[in-house]
């Protein structure tokens, strides 16, 4: 490694560590836990004011458990361990389904179950969080719960070898009407978001407790993604698929492609399948950067559609995922374009997404485009993810992981 690259990487790591330590973690350690009632808030507005009446969503709590556990594992932060313990207990005591296993998707403020469906996205994150908590703390109970939940999903949700359906009933039945919800408005039997996070669940379990059986399962899931979701002509990923392996949506989701690029490589490494995905992973990142990068104002656009063109919103998690994907591609290829892009994206994050006064990141950067289409796109984005700092889909997972991965990868590259 030359001196310039070494300097760029160490500078990037220092800046990420600064953002994590002074901006992200203080927010998630101070703003989300109600000490008086020993419970977590489900919603924090842009002024850091909690709404104690809102339902608590499994996605927020599982992602908090993952984040607190990952920080504790890497740095030994005891405040994060305390919060991880509290999140773990809440999941087991209030979210776990005592009759059928798995977790409820949403509960009321008094812990009464509100959404009882087994949405695979949430079940996957339950496994991801439990496995990381087990790895960080040595909890055999958490690992057993993760493994048992995974077995339920293999038994009921894996309707094609390596492929998991999107939503089941509380008692694990697959009914067509259950598939319709806001993340799956076409009722597709397979959506990529659920598939990707089931792959991540398998990764976390294999890393926590390696076995040949889990390794083979990872291979099956990689095969399913490549055979069903990959558009081989354009090297992009479909976001939803029919049960006949036909695409149901022509949107290119940039965050999906960036996250897939490094998770596929990570998964393949665990099962000795690197050659099958290595070139594709690099191509996915390169393609996204060529399409999504705003050469005029900086940052990355949200998505693209064959008919409707670019969605110019600049959403926080796209940029967080880009940082990990770009460093992963740089590590795999040693091509400086990926490191240069990473530096450029991090600068945009610092200037437009980090809330230096209120803590955490804004949901979206201010949109400089004033045409009617861009204005409508931003309104739609704001109505979906809101402007709040913490909620069902504004979680610490992306920001914390980006910073931890930057630090880990830079240490590995420069050692």
Image (spheres, rainbow, N blue to C red):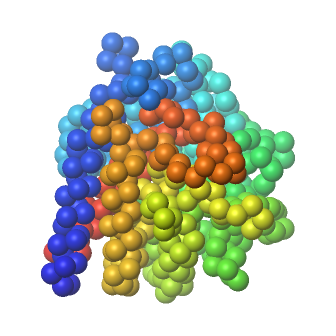
Examine the image and state in which quarter residue 349 appears: bottom left
The percent position of residue 230, horizontal first and vertical second, equals: 67, 74
Q: Tell me the residue at 17%/72% (across/down).
A: 7
Residue at 43% in and 51% down: 398
Above or below, 258 against 22 in this view is below
Across and down, in percent, residue 14 comes to 19, 58
Q: Is residue 195 visible?
A: no
- Residue 127 percent across, percent down from the top left: 49, 48
Quarter of the picture containing the N terminus is bottom left
Q: Left of 325 or right of it: where is 218?
A: right
Q: Is residue 327 visible?
A: yes
- Tell me if 68 is positioned left or right of 238 in this view: left
Q: Is residue 303 above or below residue 340?
A: above
> At which x and y percent is residue 190?
73, 58
| x 67%, y 80%: residue | 234
Can you say which quadrant of the picture contains the C terminus?
bottom left
Please identify the quarter of the rendering in which residue 181 is found: top right
Rendered residue at 23%/61% (across/down): 13
The residue nearer to you, when weighing 324 against 8, is 8
Q: Looking at this view, name the residue that lies furthest to the top.
A: 36
């Amino acid at each position: 490694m030359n001196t310039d690259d070494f300097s760029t990487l160490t500078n990037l790591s220092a800046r990420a560590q600064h953002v994590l330590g002074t901006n992200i973690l203080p927010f998630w350690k101070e703003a989300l836990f109600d000490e008086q009632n020993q419970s977590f808030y489900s919603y924090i507005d842009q002024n850091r004011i909690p709404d104690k009446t809102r339902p608590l969503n499994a996605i927020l709590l599982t992602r908090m458990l993952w984040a607190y556990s990952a920080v504790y594992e890497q740095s030994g932060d005891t405040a994060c361990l305390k919060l991880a313990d509290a999140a773990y207990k809440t999941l087991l005591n209030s979210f776990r389904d005592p009759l059928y296993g798995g977790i409820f998707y949403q509960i009321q403020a008094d812990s009464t179950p509100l959404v009882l469906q087994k949405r695979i996205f949430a079940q996957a994150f339950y496994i991801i969080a439990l496995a990381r908590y087990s790895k960080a703390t040595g909890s055999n109970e958490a690992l057993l719960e993760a493994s048992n939940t995974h077995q339920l999903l293999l038994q009921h949700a894996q309707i094609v070898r390596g492929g998991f359906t999107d939503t089941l009933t509380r008692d694990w039945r697959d009914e067509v009407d259950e598939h319709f919800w806001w993340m799956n408005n076409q009722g597709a039997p397979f959506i990529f978001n659920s598939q990707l996070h089931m792959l991540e669940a398998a990764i976390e379990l294999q890393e926590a407790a390696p076995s040949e059986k889990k390794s083979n399962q990872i291979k099956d899931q990689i095969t399913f993604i490549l055979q069903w979701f990959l558009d081989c002509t354009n090297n992009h990923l479909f976001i939803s698929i029919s049960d006949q392996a036909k695409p149901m949506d022509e949107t290119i989701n940039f965050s999906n492609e960036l996250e897939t690029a490094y998770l596929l490589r990570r998964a393949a490494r665990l099962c000795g399948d690197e050659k099958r995905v290595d070139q594709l992973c690099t191509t996915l990142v390169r393609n996204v950067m060529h399409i999504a990068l705003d050469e005029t104002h900086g940052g990355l656009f949200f998505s693209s559609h064959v008919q409707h063109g670019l969605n110019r919103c600049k959403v926080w998690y796209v940029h967080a995922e880009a940082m990990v994907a770009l460093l992963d591609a740089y590590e795999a290829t040693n091509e400086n374009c990926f490191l240069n892009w990473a530096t450029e994206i991090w600068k945009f994050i610092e200037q437009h997404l980090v809330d230096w006064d209120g803590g955490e990141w804004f949901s979206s950067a201010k949109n400089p485009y004033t045409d009617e289409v861009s204005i409508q796109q931003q309104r739609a984005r704001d109505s979906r993810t809101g402007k709040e700092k913490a909620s069902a889909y504004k979680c610490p997972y992306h920001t914390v992981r980006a910073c931890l991965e930057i630090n880990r990868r830079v240490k590995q590259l420069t050692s």
